[in-house]
């Protein structure tokens, strides 16, 4: 039997691979690339909720100028950066501690614990916000618990005060996302050969110094990747704030996604919202995207 | 694993830390699930009664008055269709990348991952206008398309990695026996992808089932999924604790059970995404 060439060759006009890739390409094009370009275009127009002809009133850079004079929008950007930073710092710290702890336990025991610990990951962030809304309720379990130590709402006002609302959303985020860091770091820990630790042990290194001298340097790459992924994920935070504080009190916990969403769908400033979300995407790209690409290039070279 | 000789206080400290981690993780889930079965007055009673007679009034109400039966069906249709589309398209595209055997294919699938960086809100607002003009808002199709584009980049990337590992000889042997390339995909490649398909299935299902922001704007009362149903309780200043707990329980319990069953694949999918990056 004659063997046809199994692989694609353009010269023969064989288009099977193009056909296979086409559906994916079309979806990405129509539901991602096209809306992004369209949104960028519309951010130079004045678009309200009446959508008969969005490209009617060209206003140039007005929407971007408006951002420069909008203190709530700037607050939202700042809040989002604080949220990202706080969320990442906390999940990394608690994730590392727990991953190392689980790794030190007997395999059977950690096999029982792990499925319990990953439960929060499966819950919608919207519901996570709702759960924490119960917890932070003045009549809820948190203040009952603090009351046992003689502490009350005046010591930690939670979601009721501007000073702690954002922190409260960050804590709820820790609750949900720490398991993700545990899972990834556990996989990383398993990849480190035991001989390294044995050698360190023979040299008289204790648990702490072998962590800082062996574990951390060897997991640098893993940390780098989850840092960038977490950065991207936290910078678009919406659901958890939506259900926990709604951005309040007094816009103290408003994130850029929350603010753009309310500008678009509550205030009917569609084009201003598109300008805001374009700015959000730009910041994400500069802060997390470029390092991500550079990291990938470096890795594929080595 | 080297076991450092541990003093008793180190063991005690580890035990305490584990207890704290467990209580920290499980108590919030217990609170919401148990509230769903309590009378509204009892919910506010502190300390919470650990033993109480469960009542089902909140569940009854959300199904009878708030259409949660319909929302549940919508969620099921949206998330299973998204999962099917995403896996089919993603694995076919990955096979296409393999067949053309050029390095730009791999690069293309890496570039797709940049899609992860786009905040949902940046796509949503213009997409909402486009869908509106196309007359698609309010349909389940609109949400399914949005969720598919949200998950497709990752699925394609995951599948590309798996298909790359399939030896060329296998495909060539199939070809020699008269198997067309498309048939080879369904007979040989797809069965070998089973672990990747399982990982993609739980990750996509979870994403779609729990997604809020697209569902919120692209659906209407007939097509609301569960998350939007829950969101309708929390939008207001005060929250109806009983009903929202019941709604949250209905929403999270199925996906937690599914995640438990698919644990192994959930973990391998997440680590593949993060570690290989």
Image (cartoon, coloured by chain):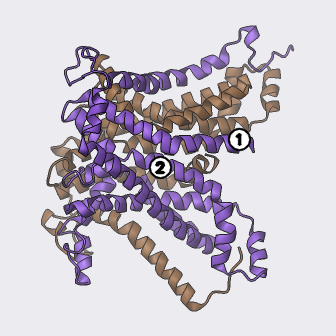
Chain colours: A purple, B brown
Label 2 belongs to which residue? A231
The relative height of residue B13 versus residue B260 in the rendered view (above or below) is: below
Chain containing the residue with disc 1: A
Q: Name the residue under label 1.
A: A300
Q: Which residue is drawn at 36% across and 25% down?
A: A39
Host chain of mark 2: A
Where is residue A187 shown, x and y percent of the image? Answer: 62, 59
- Mark 1 element type: helix
Q: Position of residue A75 (x, y in %)?
A: 29, 48
The image shows residue B205 at horizontal and vertical percentages of 45, 42
Q: Which secondary structure lies at badge 2?
A: helix
Which residue is rendered at x = 47% and y = 81% of the image?
A: B16
Quadrant assignment, res B154: top right
The tally of labels here is 2
A16 or A146: which is nearer to us? A146
Q: In this view, does B124 lie above or below A79?
A: above
Q: Which residue is drawn at 63% across and 45% down?
A: A295
**In this view of the protein, which residue sits in the foreground, A89 or A184?**
A89
């Amino acid at each position: 039997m004659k063997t046809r060439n199994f692989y694609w060759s353009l010269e023969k006009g064989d288009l099977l691979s193009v056909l296979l890739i086409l559906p994916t390409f079309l979806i990405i094009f129509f539901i991602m690339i096209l809306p992004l370009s369209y949104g960028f275009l519309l951010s130079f127009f004045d678009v309200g909720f009446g959508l008969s002809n969005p490209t009617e009133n060209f206003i140039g850079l007005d929407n971007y100028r408006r951002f420069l004079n909008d203190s709530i929008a700037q607050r939202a950007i700042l809040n989002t950066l604080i949220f990202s930073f706080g969320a990442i710092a906390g999940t990394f710290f608690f994730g590392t501690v727990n991953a190392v702890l689980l790794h030190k336990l007997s395999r059977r025991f950690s096999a029982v614990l792990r499925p319990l610990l990953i439960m929060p990951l499966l819950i919608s962030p919207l519901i996570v916000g709702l759960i924490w809304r119960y917890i932070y309720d003045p009549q809820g379990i948190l203040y009952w618990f603090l009351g046992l130590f003689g502490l009350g709402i005046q010591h930690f006002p939670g979601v009721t005060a501007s000073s702690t609302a954002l922190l409260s959303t960050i804590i709820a985020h820790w609750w949900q996302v720490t398991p993700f860091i545990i899972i990834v770091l556990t996989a990383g820990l398993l990849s480190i050969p035991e001989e390294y630790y044995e050698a360190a042990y023979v040299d008289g290194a204790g648990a702490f110094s072998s962590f800082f001298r062996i574990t951390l340097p060897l997991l640098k790459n893993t940390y780098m990747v989850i840092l960038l992924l977490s950065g991207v994920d936290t910078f678009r935070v919406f659901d958890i704030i939506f259900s926990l504080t709604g951005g309040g009190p007094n816009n103290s916990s408003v994130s850029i996604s929350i603010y753009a969403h309310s500008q678009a769908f509550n205030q009917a400033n569609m084009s201003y919202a598109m300008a805001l979300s374009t700015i959000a995407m730009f910041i994400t790209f500069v802060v997390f995207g470029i390092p991500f690409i550079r990291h990938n290039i470096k890795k594929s070279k080595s | 694993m080297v076991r450092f000789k541990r003093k008793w206080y180190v063991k005690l400290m580890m035990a305490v830390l584990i207890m704290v981690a467990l209580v920290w993780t499980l108590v919030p889930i217990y609170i919401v699930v148990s509230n769903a079965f309590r009378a509204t007055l009892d919910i506010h009673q502190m300390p919470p009664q650990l033993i109480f007679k469960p009542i089902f009034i909140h569940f009854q109400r959300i199904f009878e008055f708030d259409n949660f039966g319909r929302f549940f069906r919508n969620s099921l249709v949206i998330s299973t269709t998204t999962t099917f589309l995403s896996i089919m398209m993603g694995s076919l595209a990955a096979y296409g990348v393999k067949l053309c055997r050029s390095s730009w294919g791999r690069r293309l699938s890496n570039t797709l991952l940049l899609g992860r960086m786009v905040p949902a809100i940046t796509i949503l607002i213009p997409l909402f206008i486009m869908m509106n003009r196309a007359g698609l808002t309010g349909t389940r199709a609109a949400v399914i398309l949005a969720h598919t584009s949200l998950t497709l980049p990752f699925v394609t990337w995951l599948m590309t990695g798996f298909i790359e590992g399939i030896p060329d000889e296998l495909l060539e042997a199939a070809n020699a026996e008269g198997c067309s390339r498309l048939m080879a995909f369904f007979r040989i490649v797809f069965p070998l992808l089973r672990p990747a398909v399982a990982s993609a299935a739980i990750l996509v299902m979870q994403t779609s089932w729990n997604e809020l922001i697209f569902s919120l704007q692209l659906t209407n009362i007939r097509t609301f999924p569960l998350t939007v149903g829950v969101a309708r309780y929390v939008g207001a200043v005060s929250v109806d604790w009983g009903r929202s707990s019941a709604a949250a329980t209905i929403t999270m319990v199925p996906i937690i059970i599914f995640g438990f069953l698919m644990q192994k694949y959930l973990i391998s999918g997440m680590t593949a995404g993060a570690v290989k990056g």
